[in-house]
Image (cartoon, rainbow, N blue to C red):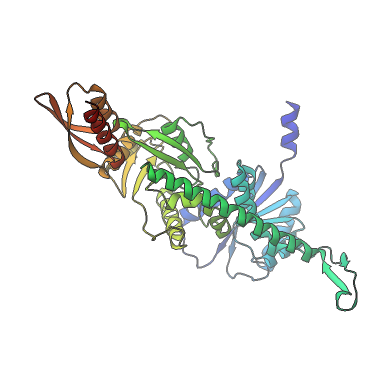
Amino acid sequence: MSHSVDLQEKRDAVISVHPEISGKAAGESARAARAAEFDRLVIASDCDLLDSVVVPIRKVRSATLLGTGQMEQMKHHVQACEAAVVFVDHPLSPVQQRNLEKAWETKVVDRTGLILEIFAARARTSEGAMQVELASLNYQISRLVRSWTHLERQRGGFGFLGGPGERQLELDKRMIRNRIRQIEQDLVGVRRMRSTQRAGRRRKEIPTVALVGYTNAGKSTLFNRLTQAGVFAADQLFATLDPTMRKVELTGGHALMLSDTVGFVQELPHELVEAFRATLEEVVEADLIVHVRDASDEQVIEQGKVVDDTLHMIMSEGWVEGGSEMPPKIEVWNKTDLAPQVVSRINPGIDGSKVALSAVTGTGVDDLLGLLRDWLESHMSQTELRIPISDGRAMAWCHANGRVLEQQHDGEDMLLTVRMSQASLGRIRSMLEEKHVGS
């Protein structure tokens, strides 16, 4: 028990600031939802949120963002709360961040910095850690402060090599750039490995389905429901950072690879989009996208737009080989246990269609599995096979690896009308030819 008390004592006391810039088109409910989401991000960073302050801004100051009077008011508030950190729900330039820290005499973190800190704490695999570190370094390199100008390192030598050398700050920047280059090289290897894995799945005709969605929409819970994988899932923002892939067996002998990916959020920092390229390529290179949406959230429409905009931004980056066509998409409206009224408004189908379910209770999951099976079969071939009635093994194989649409007797043979993948058709034909040759 004392151990948990010690952990609680280490939590930073913080304040969140929500600048509301005059003239920015956003409804009251949208602004409130964004502020609430930001505060949830602050809490997700394991901080003790003391207060959440809305600051209206008529004119943005390039040096400080806020006006002089607002700066002074916030300084008194920060001191009264003894806040260790002030989180600002707005991108801050390096100059703005430094000036705010100087004025308030405390650490200041903007929206991008906050998301990066959460990602750094949540990354569980070496690949995820590399991607977060790359994003953090690209973010930090322009924010190194010359707080040690008295530490001017001298470099010995003769003639043109003599004199004042690099400051510690410049050395730090050089070290960061070297580290960035190293991580980028390592991630190229990761992307190459993933590309090889995708090519292998295509050769085996195993399609990939990517789960995407706004953060905390329930992707990992649905992933666990479909695969029994035991992936970490929690009611918190950015619970999943590291991509996970599992095979899902469907009825009719069908199978697919399901990929769980990082959740999206409003104004996802570009540093993260670029750094998570190796992960996000799994989405845009997928054969099908399943967009998971939180049906119980009042901002579900706006969140869906954020996801769609982010997907189109990724596609426009030119990451996809051979074109930029968006994969077909199924929308899953999750958490119907919290929003049962949604079920009656959902019509199942493929590409832009919707299915309502609850990943927690399992209600409606069979509808999704049926949609996935229908989608798989829509890419299959239909043919007629003649199989000897005595060949029970071949008959059973057809039922296990495809869909038998019709079967009828024809003397000592069975005529089967089947739908299955090209790979499965090749396999059953080889089996029948071997049987014929052997006889």
Is residue 264 in view? no
- Counting from the top left corner in percent of width and height, residue 397 is at 28, 28
Q: Looking at the image, which is closer to me, 252 or 131?
A: 252
Q: Quadrant of residue 138?
A: bottom right
Q: Residue furthest left?
A: 411
Q: Looking at the image, which is closer to me, 101 or 186?
A: 186
Location of the C terminus (image quadrant): top left
- Counting from the top left corner in percent of width and height, residue 32 is at 51, 52
- Counting from the top left corner in percent of width and height, residue 226 is at 41, 33
Location of the N terminus (image quadrant): top right
Relative height, residue 234 to residue 50 (above, below): above
Q: Looking at the image, which is closer to me, 428 or 296?
A: 428
- Counting from the top left corner in percent of width and height, residue 381 is at 23, 42
Which residue is drawn at the image coordinates 53% and 52% (left, top)? 191
Q: Residue furthest front?
A: 438
In the image, 67: left or right of 299?
Answer: right
Q: Looking at the image, which is closer to me, 183 or 68?
A: 183
Which residue is drawn at the image coordinates 25% and 28% (left, top)? 399
In the image, 19: left or right of 373?
Answer: right
Relative height, residue 216 to residue 191 (above, below): above
Q: Residue furthest bottom?
A: 159
In the image, 212: left or right of 18?
Answer: left
In the image, 32: left or right of 75?
Answer: left
Is residue 379 in view? yes
In this rendering, the count of numbered labels is 0
Q: Quadrant of residue 365?
A: top left
Which residue is drawn at the image coordinates 45% and 55% (left, top)? 306
